[in-house]
Amino acid sequence: MLVRLILVAVLMVAVFFFYLYQINTTEAIFYLTTSKSYETPLIVMLLISLGAGALLVILISLAADLRNAISNWQLRKNELAKRKARKMEVEGQKYLAEGWHSRAKDSFLAALDKDPTLVPALLGGSRACSFLNDSEQGRALLERAKGLCQGDNELLLAVAEGNQALGALKEALDICQKLPRGQDSIMVSRKLTELYQQAGMWREAWESQKEVVRLSAPRGLVKQEEKTLLWLRYKYALSLLTLGDLDGANQALKEIVRQHPEFTPAQVTLGDCLLRQGKNQDAAEVWERAFLLHQAMVFLLRLEELYLSREEPDTVIRLYQRALTERAGFPLPRLFLARLYLRLEMLDEALEHLNHLAGTGEDSPFFHQLLGEVYRRRNLTDKAAEEFTRALGFRRRPSLPFVCQSCQREFTEWSGICPGCDECGTLGLKPEHPEA
């Protein structure tokens, strides 16, 4: 049907032009050059012009169709390559989750050969490189990802995390510091806090955590974030103390004690700082007030060392006797007093207090260590060996059972921050509170 319509149209055009040819007999001269010309009817010249125009339109249309066909073919080819790249990237993520880091890296790199702009493959490849200790290639992949992620804060944060995994803290910090921070940027502030901690930049970590606390208020997470803020503030004070900035540490610790009187690590460390400044009496006053407030035995231990160094054992004995009176039924003051008598070679007094504890059912390793040491110094070797066996190990100087309330690990030295789980203010003596 279409062919017939075309033939009819062509026939009608031919008849129309034949009609025009019959009634238009005027001749026209067409010059090819200045010396060569042709004479032809005007209507034929018109027909040739129309035909040439139509041919030109057809050629242009064909060229456009060809260009579109090539473009569509290229798009289909690129789309196919991207689909293959995404498939390889998913395969790489699977290998990564299963611990096949080398295979994961190969899959990510193969995906990037198909689609160099596939950001998840760049990030996945850098992560695989971090497991394979190939920091050079990992950082190169992240640099490419960074260039493709401009304006996308979420992806830029992922690039920063990739740099962090590779140990490139400077690059990670540089990215996060340039990201905008507002009401919806709590993840950026948290990441900055984490990076500053990892870099040992405690003041900066503390300042960044303040922003986290502010942004956490609408989310109801302030309590936990404020706990982290206090921990970072204490770490900053410790860093000043470690660096020898005693005045700065003193000021920072006093501020913590003033604003958080319940935070015992700051009070212990403030006394330590005062001792290093030569202010022994001020340190003693800080620890005595703290003990009266918190009843934590670590303060008595600090005071014991201080007063013994000043050859004032009677002062320590009075402190322990006061603690015995105020905390009746609590074994630690009596244990420590027995240990003090042992250090002072007052064996009869030490044995008296230990025998009193034995009558209460006390059976801790520390108790048996002390009792064994008393027997050893009295040359009662059989009894000493029996007590040391009960204590499951002998140390010439009996150690104290500091236990972390968070990870339950035991340590022989007190620390404001648990060496095992890095929690702040969780170390206490094992029987810190009497049994109910």
Image: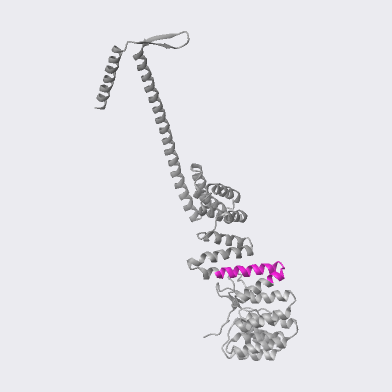
- The structure residue drawn at horizontal position 71% and vertical position 68%, both measured from the top left corner, is 245
The answer to which of 153 and 120 lies nearer the viewer is 153
Total labels drawn? 0
Which residues fall within the magenta stretch?
Answer: 226-249
Q: Residue furthest top?
A: 35
The answer to whether residue 385 is visible is yes
Within the image, what quadrant is residue 365 found in? bottom right
Q: Main secondary structure of the magenta part?
A: helix
Residue 346 position in % (x across, y down): 71, 89
Within the image, what quadrant is residue 378 found in? bottom right
The answer to which of 202 and 133 lies nearer the viewer is 202
Residue 86 position in % (x across, y down): 45, 47
In the image, taking residue 299 as reference, residue 182 lies left or right, namely left
Instruction: Tell me: residue 409, above or below residue 165.
Output: below
Instruction: Tell me: residue 99, above or below residue 413.
Output: above
Residue 426 position in % (x across, y down): 58, 74
In the image, taking residue 133 as reference, residue 92 lies left or right, namely left
The answer to whether residue 412 is visible is no
Instruction: Tell me: residue 277, above or below residue 12.
Output: below
- The structure residue drawn at horizontal position 71% and vertical position 84%, both measured from the top left corner, is 343
Q: How is the image coloured?
A: one colour
Instruction: Tell me: residue 239, above or below residue 131.
Output: below
The answer to which of 162 and 96 lies nearer the viewer is 162
Residue 396 position in % (x across, y down): 69, 79
Q: Quadrant of the N terminus?
A: top left
Within the image, what quadrant is residue 74 found in? top left
Q: Is residue 252 magenta?
A: no
